[in-house]
Amino acid sequence: MPAVTLLSKPDAVLAYEMLPGDAASSLLVIFLNGLGLPQSAWKPTIELFQQQSTVSPKPWLLTYDRYGQGGSSRDPRESWPTKDPGYAHTLDDVSHHCRGDPLPRLQPRQHQLRDHLAESEGPVLQPRADDTPGTTLEVYQAAYTKMCMSFSGHAKNVEGFDRRDIKDMLPDPSSPKLKGPKDWPEKGPWITVVGHELEQFSQEEWSLLKVPIGMAAMYTQPAKGPLIAPKSGHFIQKDNPLFVAKELQDLVEKVEASSAERVPR
């Protein structure tokens, strides 16, 4: 897999893959990874998008592994004496790598489709012994402890992604408000929010963390999102790549249409 080095970190490499689109396309789609899966997890979605999409011209596609992921090197900052072990790079660091260094500029076109990702502290669960028959309060408390160890902002991860300051940077999950495509004159991005299927996610939590089946429905996912991906757990692109490929086509079409509206006549 191809790799590049950033000027700020010449001794480490970032693994990437650039899939060329049509010459007439001015759109670059960047696939960003979560903590659990590297860029290779996007491959089925991308293959389906390229095979079945009717978008014309086809956009350019870019995937990459952050430092500490997949085929990329560990972040050299891990050896800095000022860094706490397990907290090599912050949200600002990983955003800067994507936005301001050579990797996105390998294809110097207008970046019109963007993704904003922020992770917050884990939910505050207050289980009661009578919430689910047959499940004791101690079982719920043990599950809550496991979830906090895995998902809170202070939890360490194999990547070395320091998320401890995210709750201070974004203390309110509802603000600042993202401007949508109808907010003229400063038109915002098109955003599709997709939720996982409750049953599949519950089975996944039980398999990985032994979280009681009823806990997701009662505490962590009591409300349905605007769009639910069928037969999908936490990693929707892994469980249902066809669904993601279709949603990607819809987003690309909307972005292209919005761009056409902005062209001076």
Image (spheres, grey):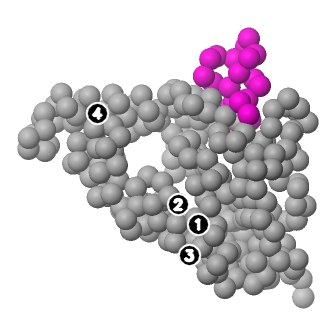
Of all residues, the one furthest to the bottom in this rendering is: 265
Residue 166 falls left or right of residue 89 = left
The image position of residue 174, as x and y in percent, is 52, 51
**Tag 4 residue:** 143
Disc assigned to residue 45: 1
Type of amino acid under label 4 = Ala
Q: Is residue 87 magenta?
A: yes
Q: Mark 1 or mark 3: which is in front?
A: 1
| Residue at 73% in and 13% down | 82
Is residue 44 or residue 124 the one in the foreground? 44
The image quarter containing residue 44 is bottom right
Of all residues, the one furthest to the top in this rendering is: 81
Region of the chain picked out in magenta, as a range: 73-93
**Tag 2 residue:** 237
Q: Secondary structure at mark 1?
A: helix
Type of amino acid under label 1 = Thr
**Tag 3 residue:** 246
Type of amino acid under label 2 = Gln
- Give the class, few, some or many, for how many residues have Cα within 10 Å of label 1's Cα (few <14, many ≥20): many
Separation of disc 2 and disc 3 at Cα?
11 Å
Residue 46 drawn above or below residue 258: above
Residue 7 drawn above or below residue 113: above
* First of labels 2, 3 by sequence position: 2
Type of amino acid under label 3 = Lys
- Give the class, few, some or many, for how many residues have Cα within 10 Å of label 4's Cα (few <14, many ≥20): some
- Quadrant housing the C terminus: bottom right
